[in-house]
Image (spheres, rainbow, N blue to C red):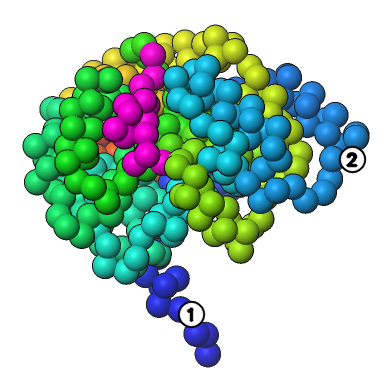
Amino acid sequence: MTHLSERISKLSESQTIAMARKSRELIAQGIDIISLSLGEPDFKTPDAVKKAAKEAIDSDYSYYTHVSGYLELRQAIAEKFRRDNGLTYTADQIVVSTGAKQSIANAVLSMVNPGDEVIIPLPFWVSYLELVKLAEGVPVMIPTTIETNFKITPEQLEKAITPKSRLFIFSTPCNPTGSVYSKDELRALADVFAKHEGLYIIADEIYEHINFVGKHESLAQFPDMYDRTITINGVSKGFAMTGWRGGILAAPKWIAQACDKMQGQFTSATSSITQKAMHAAMLIDPIETKPMTDAFHRRRDLIVNGLREIPGMNCNNPDGAFYVFPEVSAFFGKKFGDLTIYNATDLCMYLLDQAHVAVVPGAAFGDDNYIRISYATSDDKLTEAVRRMREALSKLN
């Protein structure tokens, strides 16, 4: 007889990872699947980063470091924040983790008590909700639509806040929508936050470098938000280092100390070799990431233009990251043989079976009227994926 905790039983599997697993299973059967499910850049890790890791291995940099990361790395991260974001942090305000996901988990588990409310704009990255559930917090969702480019208004934010509100979690550029908040939009939200002492903000900025509309804007840049903001970043997306597992948290010192304490009981420090690689990444001029951003910008245009040619596919023009989040309810109620499409989850399975294209249902991100498509793959594969989807969707009636 098995006995699992209620905690793990209530936790949902990541649907992005689940869809990727299904894709791999079909590929193993010899089926030509185009996977647009995972958010993983298809570029190579920068040579300077790989060189630093090799040198670390050769010099036997193989032992435990400080839980939050070795001092010189955290100093380099602090300099990166000053250089790129105009943010002043000291090394003792920074915690290096095994990916931005752990950085967010550290913050949520350190800040949220059972019954505390955590405000999350819809749609959200899959792990936000699950981490709040782990902390026994109460998620409070703010809905958005494609018509507003999936951004919340200050009025919506004000309405969602109660005396029990403890955290607000959002990402810009956003996963899954690609939406980017401007400086003015962030300032308008900050005006609301400023009125509610005791409410802290997790600003997930992991897609910082993949921005098609100009300079990235950080919420912590505003003096009245600096002590209330937990800034999350990392090297996975901007430097094509998903497998290295290097995340960054920068926050008021008392929050950073709490996250260090939390991490000390889960993993201790991330890999010493990864830390050396991250150090090299922090020294790279952001201009060197522009070719990758330019490629994603081109792919954004390719996929959006292609999707807009499919009748029933409602797609906006996202400003960053490498996702589109089209609204697909026009296909609900349609049939293919004995199969009826009732929601986006059904549609995703239909596309996997009939078009051999893997995308993720919007239910994973809080709204099953949409699907998430990652365009972190080649132009040729994106063109072929759109062709396959158009053909398969035309068969629905």
**Vertical comparison of 255 with 85: above or below:** below
Q: Nearer the viewer, residue 123 or 316?
A: 123
Q: Residue furthest bottom?
A: 1
Q: Nearer the viewer, residue 375 or 236?
A: 236
Residue 152 appears anywhere in the view: no
* Label ID, residue 4: 1
Q: Residue at x 55, y 14 (%)?
A: 286
Q: Nearer the viewer, residue 143 or 325?
A: 143
Type of amino acid under label 1: Leu
Residue 216 belongs to magenta span = yes
Type of amino acid under label 2: Asp
- Give the CA separation, mark 1 to mark 2: 40 Å
**Label 1 SS:** loop
- With 381 as the anchor, is 194 left or right in this view? left
Q: Number of labelled discs?
A: 2
Q: Residue at x 54, y 9 (%)?
A: 287
- With 45 as the anchor, is 260 left or right in this view? left
Residue depth check, mark 1 versus mark 2: number of the one nearer the observer:
2
Residue 2 appears anywhere in the view: yes
Q: Residue at x 31, y 34 (%)?
A: 225
Res 348 → quadrant:
top left
- With 54 as the anchor, is 389 left or right in this view? left
In the rendered image, residue 385, in percent from the top left (x then y), is placed at: 41, 27
Q: Nearer the viewer, residue 71 or 350?
A: 71
Question: Which span is picked out in magenta?
Answer: 215-230
- Mark 2 Cα shell of 10 Å, populated few (<14), some (14-19), many (≥20): few
**Vertical comparison of 171 with 258: above or below:** above
Which residue does the numbered mark 2 point to in the structure image? 60
Q: Residue at x 46, y 41 (%)?
A: 251
**Label 2 SS:** loop
In the rendered image, residue 64, in percent from the top left (x then y), is placed at: 77, 51
